Image: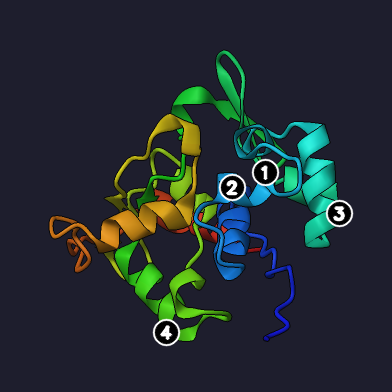
Amino acid sequence: MSNRPLRTQLRPCRSLASFVSRSAGLHGAPNAATFVSWFGANFRELCRGTDRDLDKMADILGCEPTEMKKRVILGKRSTRHFCDMELPKSFVRQSGNRVCPLCILCDEKSGDGRMIVRPFARLTWAFEHHNVCPKHCKRLVILPSLPWELGDDFHLRLRAARNSPDFGWEGEYEEPLAIDRYIVARFRR
């Protein structure tokens, strides 16, 4: 029997939903909602930044709740609280449904852990005005949607994309704009 750690690395540019989804995949859970329910937490509430669920999962995953909360996109009526910033609601997508297909493929080749759960969702992909990956010059593509009760489960969306013949894994070439470069540079520090 292998003795895998219960924690993956919580990188600065990774969303909380992606981090928990990846942890679920590392441990063979069918989805993130099931994984956190094993510990008495709720995935949708965790992704909303509910303190009870954050505290419970932070302890289990070996993270500080404050570090996890920084990676939550909190919604208010007209604004989104995102990485210690308050931005207009129109600037930030609440769900992580866009990806750079080449970033995902690179993560799978060079990331840690089992291949299927190596990729992670970047917080920068949540910005409404960030449409092109500056590193790969590829337009961000939209992942398949999930039933609402499964929440924003990044790896479950990736699995659905892998099974879809219509998903654009090659991506469309496009030159990034200055805003694309700025957003990525701002969140890499």
Give the labeled residue for mark 2: 34
Position of residue 99 in the picture relative to residue 182 (left or right):
left
Whether residues under marks 3 and 2 lie with C-beta atoms below 8 angstroms apart, the answer is no
Nearer-the-camera pick, 27 or 99 = 27
Whether residues under marks 1 and 2 lie with C-beta atoms below 8 angstroms apart, the answer is yes
* SS at badge 2: helix
* Badge nearest the viewer, 4 or 3: 3
Give the labeled residue for mark 4: 109
Q: Residue at x 37, y 58 (%)?
A: 158
* SS at badge 3: helix
Marks 1 and 2 sit apart, C-alpha to C-alpha, by: 5 Å
Nearer-the-camera pick, 55 or 139 = 55
Looking at marks 4 and 3 on the same chain, the residue that comes earlier in the sequence is marked by 3
* Badge nearest the viewer, 1 or 4: 1
Q: Is residue 1 above or below residue 61?
A: below
Whether residues under marks 4 and 3 lie with C-beta atoms below 8 angstroms apart, the answer is no
What numbered label is drawn on residue 37?
Answer: 1
Position of residue 60 in the picture relative to residue 102 (left or right):
right
Looking at marks 3 and 1 on the same chain, the residue that comes earlier in the sequence is marked by 1
Any part of residue 182 in sight: no
Position of residue 85 in the picture relative to residue 64 (left or right):
left
Looking at marks 1 and 4 on the same chain, the residue that comes earlier in the sequence is marked by 1
Q: Residue at x 55, y 66 (%)?
A: 28
* SS at badge 4: helix
Q: Residue at x 68, y 86 (%)?
A: 1
